[in-house]
Image: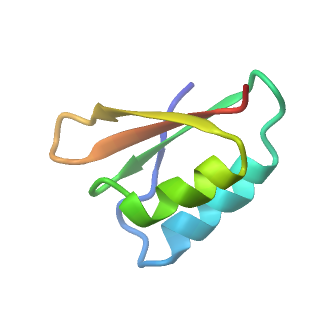
Amino acid sequence: MSPRDLRQLPPPLPMEIILDEADGLAPGQQAAYILPHHPSPLLPLLQQQGLDFRFELSGDGGVILILSRP
């Protein structure tokens, strides 16, 4: 799974892309996104969709958001 790099997109486009794609995740599927910073406003919306998420450092100052549907 290669993360999709959303760092160059203007807000709120990264959040809209993540929410749209997360809605289509089937149970057991994962998706990953590289973001410029920790997306605090997005997290409650992901929780409402019943998604699990975790973060990794991208190594260049950003973060990688990894989503999964249980």
Instruction: Give x and y (percent) for residue 60.
Output: 16, 42
Name which residue lies at 18% across and 34% down.
59
x and y, in percent, of residue 58 in the image: 26, 36
Residue 37 image point, x, y percent: 27, 56
20 sits left or right of 15 in the view:
right
Answer left or right for 53 relative to 61.
right
At x 54%, y 57%, the residue is 44
Question: Looking at the image, is 39 positioned above or below residue 27?
Answer: below
Left or right: 45 as drawn, with respect to 64: right
Q: In the rendered view, how is the structure colored?
A: rainbow
The residue positioned 15% from the left and 47% from the top of the image is 61
Q: Is residue 18 visible?
A: no
Residue 58 visible in this rendered orientation of the protein: yes
- The quadrant of the picture occupied by the C terminus is top right
- Residue at image coords 68%, 54%: 48
How many labels were placed on the picture?
0
Say which quadrant the N terminus sits in: top right
Residue nearest the viewer, comparing 15 with 3: 15
* Residue 61 drawn above or below residue 40: above
**Residue 7 at what x, y percent from top left?**
36, 60
Figure check: 34 above or below 41:
above
